[in-house]
Image (spheres, rainbow, N blue to C red):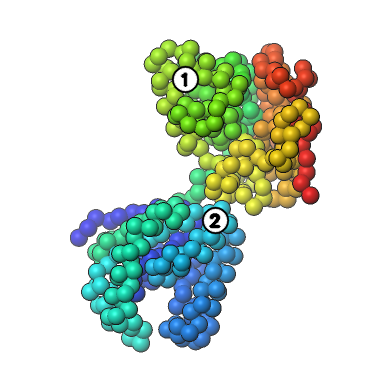
Amino acid sequence: MPEDRVIAIPSPSLVLMVGPSGSGKSTLCARHFQPTQIVSSDACRALLADDPKDQRVTPAAFNLAHAILDERLRQRRLTVLDATNLEATARREALRIAVRHHLPAVAIVLDLPPAACLRHDAGRPGRRVGRAVIARHAAALRATLPRLAREGFHGVHHVRGAAEAAALRVRTVPLPCDRASERGPFDVIGDVHGCERELVLLLQGLGYGRRSARGPFRHPEGRKAVFIGDLVDRGPGVVQAACLAMDMVEEGAALCVPGNHDDDLARTLEGGGPDPGPGTEMSLRQINAAPAALRSAFRRRFVAFVDSLPSHLLLDGERLAVAHAGLREEYVGRESADVRRFAMRGETTGRLDRFGLPVRVNWAAAYDGSPFVVYGHTPVRRPESIRNTLNIDTGCVYGGALTGLRYPERKIVSVPAARVYYQSPRLTPTGVGLRADTRTTLP
C-alpha cells in the first residue's frame, strides 16, 4: 500500500480535474472538497436536460460551468471543475477565467490504466461510457500530459494508479498574501531606502528593542513590524538596513512586501534585469565594499528573501492591506504577475512629467475597497490619506522623514532624516513630494 501523499492546493484557486471517464475524478472530488466547491460537467448537463449523459447539451453545459467558475472566482472561492479536461481547448477557457481573476489554477491528473477505468465504469449503472470511449480518453491523456506544464498551471499533480489515488490527501493552504488570521497589532514602516540610522531610531521609538547588540529587534508586547518595501538603494546603509529587516522577518518579528527597488537590486544581483539605475548603483557599491564573506552571503540571502515575499499582505481579518506602491480593489487578496507588478511598481500613463519622470497614476483616488490600504513608493511631504488608503512614504532618503503607522491605533510616528542622502538631478532641493504633485487620475 503506498504511503499517503499530501498535495497542497492554494485557496482560493481553480482546480481542474484531468483524467479519463472512470478514473475516479468525481469520487476524489467528493472525498476532498465541499459539494459547493465542485462544478461538474455531468451536473450541468443534468440541470439543462435532466440527464447527465445527454451529450447534445454539452456546449451549453460547459457555458454554464464556466459562468459558475467565473462568478465563484470573482468571489475569491476555491472552485473545482470536475470534467475530463483532456483537450487543451477544453482547458483553455477555464484557465482564462483564472487569469482574469488573478488566481492560480492547479491540475490534478488521475492517470489510471484503461482496465481500472473500465472496472469503475462497469460499477456505474446507467452511466457507462464503454470501452471505446475510455480507450480514446486514455490516448488523449498520454498526448496531453507533456503539455500541461506549459499551459500556465500553478501546479500539476500527477496521480498514478488507483492505489495512489486512494492514499491521496488534499490540504488547502492560503495564498501567500493572505495573512488575514494575523490580527496584530502592527507597526507599518515606510520606504527605508538604506536609511539604517533612522530605521533604528524609529523602531526604538515604536518600542522595539534588541536582547543583544547583534540580535533582531522585537517588541516586548508582541507587536509586529510590517515593512512596505524599498529597503535598499539611495541611502548610506543599504546592507545594514536590509539585514535588519531580514533578521526581523526570519525571527517572526516582522512581515515585509517587496518594493520595486528591492526587486531591481535582486534581479541585478542574480545577473539579470535592466541596467541598474543610479540608486541601485549606490547599493552595488556598498555591497561590493563589504567583506568578501558578507558580500557573498548577502547576495544570495537578499535575492532569496525578495523572491519569497508575497506581492502584498492582507491582514487583520481582511481589514488591513499593505503593498509597496498600492493596490487596486480587484487585486486585493489575489496573486498573479499583474498583481505583483502593480503592487511593486504602481501604474504610469506613458507620459513624462515636467521633471522628466514617468507620470504616475493616483490609483488611490479611485479605490473603493473595504480593506484599509497602507502603501508608499510615491514620496509625500507628510502622510497622505485618500479615501480608504494612507501613503506613509515621507521621503526619508530625500531629507524628509521615516514614518511608521501604529495599527489599529492609526497613530503616526516619524523620525526626521539626519540629512539629505540622495538628490536626484531631476528634482529640486525641495524634492520630497514632487512625484506626488505630478500624479494624475485616469478618466
On the picture, is 309 further left or further right than 164?
A: right
On the picture, is 94 further left or further right than 128?
A: right
Residue at the spot of label 2: 99
Say which of 344 and 176 sits in front: 344
> Within 10 angstroms of label 2, few (less than 14), some, or many (20 or more) residues?
some
**Distance from label 2 to label 1 (Cα)?**
43 Å
Q: Position of residue 353 (x, y in %)?
A: 77, 32
| Residue positioned 56% across, 36% down in the render | 257
| Residue positioned 38% across, 61% down in the render | 108
2 vs 1, front mark: 2
Say which of 190 and 318 sits in front: 190
CB contact under 8 Å: marks 2 and 1 = no
| Residue positioned 30% across, 60% down in the render | 159
- Tell me the kind of residue under disc 2: Val
Q: Does the image show residue 307?
A: yes
Q: Which disc, if any, is residue 437?
A: none
- Position of the N terminus by quadrant: bottom left
| Residue 422 found in image quarter | top right
Q: Position of residue 192 (x, y in %)?
A: 61, 24
> Within 10 angstroms of label 1, few (less than 14), some, or many (20 or more) residues?
few
Total residue callouts: 2
Say which of 77 and 183 sits in front: 77
- Tell me the kind of residue under disc 1: Gly
Q: Does the image show residue 208?
A: no
Badge 1 element: loop
Q: Position of residue 94 (x, y in %)?
A: 50, 64
Residue 276 lies, with reference to residue 172, above or below; the image says above
Residue at the spot of label 1: 215
Tell me which label, 2 or 1, sits earlier in the chain. Answer: 2
Badge 2 element: helix
Q: Position of residue 111 (x, y in %)?
A: 30, 64
